[in-house]
Amino acid sequence: MDFCKMNGAGNDFVVIDNRALDRALEREAIERLCDRHRGVGADGLLAVEPARDPQAADFRMRYYNADGGEAEMCGNGARCFARFARRLLAEGALPPATLRFETEAGVIGAEFPDDRQVRIRMSDPSPVERDLELEADGRRLLVHHVNTGVPHAVTWVDSAEELDRLPVASLGRGLRLHQRFQPAGTNVNFAWAEAPGRIRIRTYERGVEDETLACGTGMVACALVHHLITGAPSPVRVTVAGGDTLTIDFTQPESGVFREVHLTGPADFVFHGCIDP
């Protein structure tokens, strides 16, 4: 099987062309491909498939976590998917300026500000549930929850030092499995506001079951909660554990529901290869 290894702000993926629908994406095979010791190694797998409605989208994006389970959406994955699909469409011609692709969270639009950056139009998030008092890993936490394509819990810390020393794996796992978010569970983000409109985050990802260097839908969740708590205007800049800083812009109508949410950041090709899946 031919594949491409890509990363978006340190969130890495195996990406394959499955437009012919000739790849049986079984859970065990995906888990094996994403294994960092016995496979390619990745946080998840992306597959390019034909759109179910060709009038509405150019492609369909299938996203699978490293444990082989399919997820509705991945923000960093969507940017990588868009760059990979754009290259497929070009095939020697000028690449398109925009793309639209189906996900289980809705149709996503993509623009390409330059050769490395991708700006994606996210699906509309759910209303934010604010100020949930929950206990995890022996701590009482004030948690906010929002679905930005996939569910995300957001909790704030008071300093950069606290964020740096936080036990993200154990604390994140406690919230990810909390009864409040069952049966599906949730992703978990820990955030610190260094200034209005500038935040740093660390993320525990459901499906990876560990901290990752970045999570696009998690960045969006933190940016929207930051706006609600502080009133910081759009855009909000978010720095992730991998060191990259991405930009989230949005509008918020009087109803309190966010619309026109965009995530802009890098999507990089790492290498191409062939592997026995």
Image (tube, rainbow, N blue to C red):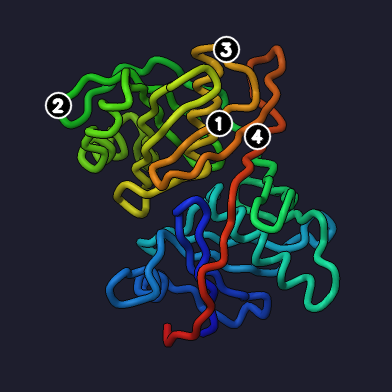
The residue that appears at 30% across and 77% down in the rendered structure is 38
The residue that appears at 51% across and 33% down in the rendered structure is 238
The amino acid pointed to by label 4 is Asp
Mark in front: 2 vs 1 = 1
On screen, residue 12 versus residue 247, left or right, reads left
| The quarter of the displayed image where residue 145 is located | top left
Q: Which of marks 4 and 2 precedes in the sequence?
A: 4
Q: Secondary structure at mark 2?
A: loop
Q: Is residue 159 above or below residue 9?
A: above
Q: Which residue is mark 3?
A: 231
Mark in front: 3 vs 4 = 3
Q: Which residue is mark 2?
A: 138
The amino acid pointed to by label 2 is Gly
User: The C terminus lies in which quarter of the figure?
Assistant: bottom left
Q: Which residue is mark 1?
A: 237
Q: Is residue 257 above or below residue 153?
A: above
Mark 3 surroundings within 10 Å by alpha-carbon count, few (fewer than 14), some (14 through 19), many (20 or more): few
The residue that appears at 35% across and 31% down in the rendered structure is 190
Q: Which residue is mark 4?
A: 124
| The quarter of the displayed image where residue 262 is located | top right
The amino acid pointed to by label 3 is Gly
Q: Secondary structure at mark 1?
A: strand
Q: Which of marks 4 and 3 precedes in the sequence?
A: 4
